[in-house]
Image: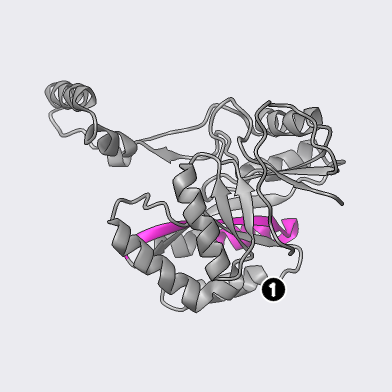
Amino acid sequence: MGKSTIQAQETQGQSVHGYRTGISLHSHTLHSRESLDFIYFAARKSAPLRYVLREGERRYRQLHGMELDLNRGWWTPPLAPLDAFVLEQKQLEEMGLRPFVSITDHDNIEAPMSLQAIEPEKHIPVSVEWTVPYRGTFFHIGVHNIVASRARMMMEHLEAYTAEPVAGRLTELLAELDADPAALIVFNHPLWDEKSVGDDVHRDALAELLSTRGEFFHALEINGLRPWSENKQVVALAEKWNKPVISGGDRHTLEPNATVNVTTP
C-alpha cells in the first residue's frame, strides 16, 4: 500500500479530478447496537444534562423500584442495510467516482450478508467492526472483505473472543484474518479511549498491541467523527509504526460518511 495523502473538500458532492474510484469504509446500519453509556460521560461536562439525568433516574426508581443503568441499554442507527448502502453509493457517484461501499456494523455481519443476497450483481464485501477487549480497555478493528463462505464461522470465532478474551487467541485470529490477501484490517480510531479507562492506560495498551501484533494491521484510521486534533495524532502514530492512514467515516445517522478514500484504479 502506497503513501497516504489527505485532502479537504469544502463542498459536498464536488467532483474529484484525477481519481476514478471512491471507497466508503466504516459505516453502520440498524444492526449495530450503540451503548447509551455516553450519556454518563456527557453529563459529567454538562450541568443541565446532569440535572435531567438525575430526574430521569429518580422517576425510573419511583416507577420500577430499581436503579436506572444506561450501561445495559442501547440504541440502533436508523438506516436499514440497503438504505445505508445507497446513501454511501450516491455520495460517491455525485463526486464522479465509481463507488465501493464497505459497511461495518458492531460485531455483526447481517447487513453485508443480506445485501449480497439482494444485490448479487454488485461486489459488496462482508465486513465488520470487531470489538477487541485488551488490557482493561477495548479497541475496534475494521475487518473488510471476509470470504463470504466462511464469514459466519469467522464471526463466531470473533464473537467468542469478544465475550471471553483468551491469551494467545487474539494473535491466532488476527493471523487468520491477515492470511487472506484480499482482506483489509484497519485499526479504527486507535486513540479513542471509548471505555474511559484513562488516556495513559488506553495508550499503554495500544502501544503494547501494536508492538506485539502490529504486523497484522494494514492501516490506521482517520475517523470522520473524531476531532482533527486526535486524527493528527493518529497520522503521527501511523508514521511511527510505518503504517498508511485510511479514512473511515463512522456514519451512524442519515448523513453520508464525512471522510472517504479515493484512488486512481
Tell me: residue 4, above or below residue 177: above
Viewer-nearest residue: 155 or 38? 38
Residue range in magenta is: 136-156
Q: Is residue 51 visible?
A: yes
**Few, some or many residues within 10 Å of mark 1 (<14, 14–19, 20+):** few
Please provide percent x and percent y for residue 84: 65, 31
Name the residue nearer the viewer: 177 or 7.
7
Identify which residue is drawn at 47% across, 56% down: 233
Residue found 57% across the figure and 53% down from its top: 221
Left or right of 136: which side holds 219? right
Residue at position x 82%, y 44% in the image: 21
**Which residue corresponds to mark 1?**
179
User: Looking at the image, is 226 positioned above or below residue 168?
Assistant: above
- Residue 248 is a magenta residue: no
Quadrant of res 139:
bottom left
What's the amino acid at mark 1?
Ala
Quarter placement of the N terminus: bottom right
Q: Position of residue 9 (x, y in %)?
A: 67, 34
Query: Is the residue 142 above or below the residue 97 in the image?
Result: below
> In front: 187, or 133?
187
